[in-house]
Amino acid sequence: MSESLHLTRNGAILEIVLDRPKANAIDAATSHEMGEIFLQFRDDPALRVAIITGAGERFFSAGWDLKSAAQGEAPDADFGPGGFAGLTEMFTLDKPVIAAVNGYAFGGGFELALAADMVICAENASFALPEARLGIVPDSGGVLRLPKRLPPAIASEMLMTGRRMDAREALRWGIVNDIVSPDTLMEKARELATQIITSAPLAVAALKEIVRATAELSIEEGYRLMRSGVLRHYPGVLHSEDATEGPLAFAGKREPQWKSR
């Protein structure tokens, strides 16, 4: 692993810190490494939740490394497994990822945050997709995910002008879960991760799978898909040992002992 990425295992929580001064920008090589990390997180049964953040207090990530672009790295370069930043196209990851946004999340940095399941941001955080001003488009998920999260007029404004959204506006539109002081950002992210871990692993995987698979469907179509038996996690969770353990633990007024089976 390069010096650009720092990993810490805190029990079932994997913390990933992007550390590429000055702006935590991501080139193709770093993106490949991030993809490998998220694959390892996906496949490690001991890990339940990942937190991704940036080093320092100013930048979560400025997105694609424009210095690499100036040296010839193409916008459609091979960014490795999971697409840009390792997460924006990782559709097989059924474990939650929390983005702890510690400052500017611009371009691909914003796209990375949008690809996470939950976002906690510091008071000084801001978000923008400035690609149109650079002659390109935010095609690592920004142009696809942002219009699903914002009213069409607001999404179009951000996409076409590159204007910044501050933390309070992001909270108002539901882009982030919470705003905290910079010095409590990781504490809050870890608190949220710990809360997730109290839920059954199979249930969390099934929930993420169902939300992803039914995002574009009507409620009726969503029911039909859930009942079809084609989903990977949902059918098994209904008859799992954990599904029996949960009610038993509740009735016995004790903490459940999840076995992931």
Image (cartoon, rainbow, N blue to C red):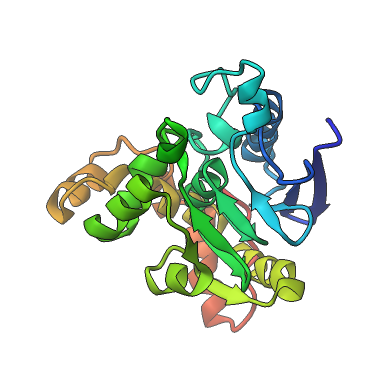
Q: Residue furthest right?
A: 3
Q: Is residue 216 visible?
A: yes
Q: Is residue 148 visible?
A: no
Q: Quadrant of the N terminus?
A: top right
Q: Is residue 93 left or right of residue 20?
A: left
**Residue at point 29% right, 59% down?**
154
Residue 43 x, y percent position in the rendering:
64, 35
Residue 117's place in the image compared with 250, above or below, is: above
Residue 136's place in the image compared with 169, above or below, is: above
Residue 16's place in the image compared with 75, above or below, is: below
Task: Please give the count of numbered marks on the rendered protein.
Answer: 0
Out of 150 and 33, give the one closest to the viewer.
Answer: 150
**Residue at point 54% right, 41% down?**
108
Q: Residue furthest bottom?
A: 253
Out of 37 and 146, give the one closest to the viewer.
Answer: 146
**Residue at point 53% right, 78% down?**
250
Residue 132 x, y percent position in the rendering:
40, 38
**Residue at point 34% right, 57% down?**
149
Where on the picture, by quarter, is residue 196? bottom right
Out of 50 and 208, give the one closest to the viewer.
Answer: 50
Residue 88 x, y percent position in the rendering:
50, 38
Where on the picture, by quarter, is residue 39? top right
Residue 49 x, y percent position in the rendering:
64, 54
Where on the picture, by quarter, is residue 194? bottom right
Q: Is residue 20 left or right of residue 106?
A: right
